[in-house]
Image (cartoon, coloured by chain):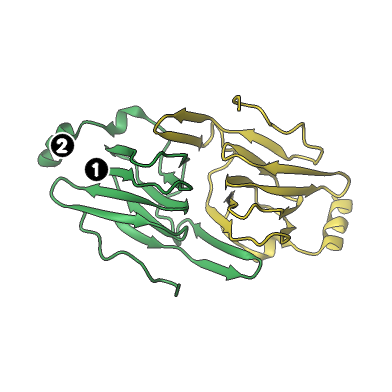
Chain colours: A yellow, B green
């Protein structure tokens, strides 16, 4: 696959960007990387990894009031659903050098994980349940006020 | 597997520590996470992912003068060889919630990747070729001077 192929079209949800990370392919293996602030727009204070997700499960389904996230499917693939209250879009993450920067106040879901799928999420801040919006009606109200 | 099983015995190489990250296992999938500074001893300024490593390949084989690293095998497994100039040890990373903190001035290799193995490395600083020591004799000399 030529480098840079498969980059999603401009994403129709406010502020969400696909990030193309460098990749070095060698006979002894492949490497992809990202650095602050050349490739990463924030210093990650938290990471999490999601794995062993059964087929048909939908995860996420919330927005963050203040936290930025970068999603990378580091093995296998998964789909990300995006919604800003006005527009919706869907991105398939299927290679470890394709990232998705999701800023605050975007409603996001993850679904259709391959059986070997592993999602890595880099977060701009530590876990704080108070900055989650997990009710879609509340999210829409907040977006209308904004 | 009960939580906390399989943690390596105390590692016989100066300053290297196994890190046990939290893991949440649910019917809808598993999640493991790490935060600065509760679990991570530094804010990562760089990450890299290593994948598609052919069987039999050895990677790494260098020390860092100043950079700290945390190694996590986020899919499959790989082995890490460690050497401080006096003692050697070997750790197998085989679950995404088991990390290895390698401080500066430890000679490390990675080998025996499973065919699906993906290694995530979090680094305390951006890439700088000047802080690598890639010659083992030079490394031993630097350790004798220390």
Check disc 2 and report the residue beneath it. B142
Q: Give the farthest residue toward the left.
A: B144
Q: Chain of mark 1?
A: B
Where residue A19 sits in the image (x, y, percent)?
Answer: 64, 35
Q: Give the farthest residue toward the bottom.
A: B2
Where residue A73 sits in the image (x, y, percent)?
Answer: 60, 46
Q: Is residue A134 above or below residue A111?
A: below
For the residue carrying disc 2, how many other residues have a C-alpha within 10 Å: few (<14), some (14-19), or many (20+)? some
Q: From the viewer's side, name the closer residue of A98 and B102.
A: A98
Left or right, B112 with respect to A69, comes to left
Where residue A7 sits in the image (x, y, percent)?
Answer: 69, 31
Where residue B24 sits in the image (x, y, percent)?
Answer: 56, 68
Q: Is residue B92 above or below residue B66?
A: below
SS at mark 1 in the image = loop
Residue at left offset 64%, top offset 52%: A114
Closer to the chain start, of discs 2 and 1, is 1
Residue B105's mark?
Answer: 1
For the residue carrying disc 1, how many other residues have a C-alpha within 10 Å: few (<14), some (14-19), or many (20+)? many
Could you tell me how far apart the alpha carbons at marks 2 and 1 are, in whole angstroms?
9 Å
Residue at left offset 36%, top offset 54%: B100
Residue B15 seen in the figure? no
Task: Determine whether label 2 and label 1 are within 8 Å by CB.
Answer: yes
Q: Chain of mark 2?
A: B
Quadrant position of the C terminus of chain B in the picture: top left
Quadrant position of the N terminus of chain B in the picture: bottom left
Left or right, A120 with respect to B80, comes to right
Residue B96 seen in the figure? yes
Residue A21's mark?
Answer: none
Quadrant in the rendering for residue B126: top left
SS at mark 2 in the image = helix
């Amino acid at each position: 696959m030529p480098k840079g192929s498969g980059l999603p079209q401009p994403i129709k949800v406010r502020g969400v960007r696909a990030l193309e990370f460098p990749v070095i392919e060698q006979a002894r293996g492949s490497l992809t990387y990202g650095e602050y602030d050349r490739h990463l727009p924030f210093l990650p204070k938290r990471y999490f990894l999601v794995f062993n997700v059964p087929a048909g499960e939908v995860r996420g389904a919330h927005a963050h009031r203040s936290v930025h996230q970068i999603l990378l499917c580091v093995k296998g693939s998964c789909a990300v659903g995006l919604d800003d209250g006005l527009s919706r879009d869907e991105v398939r993450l299927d290679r470890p050098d394709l990232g998705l920067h999701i800023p605050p106040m975007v409603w996001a879901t993850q679904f259709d994980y391959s059986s070997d799928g592993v999602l890595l999420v880099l977060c701009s801040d530590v876990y704080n349940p108070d900055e989650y919006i997990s009710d879609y009606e509340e999210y829409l109200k907040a977006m209308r006020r904004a």
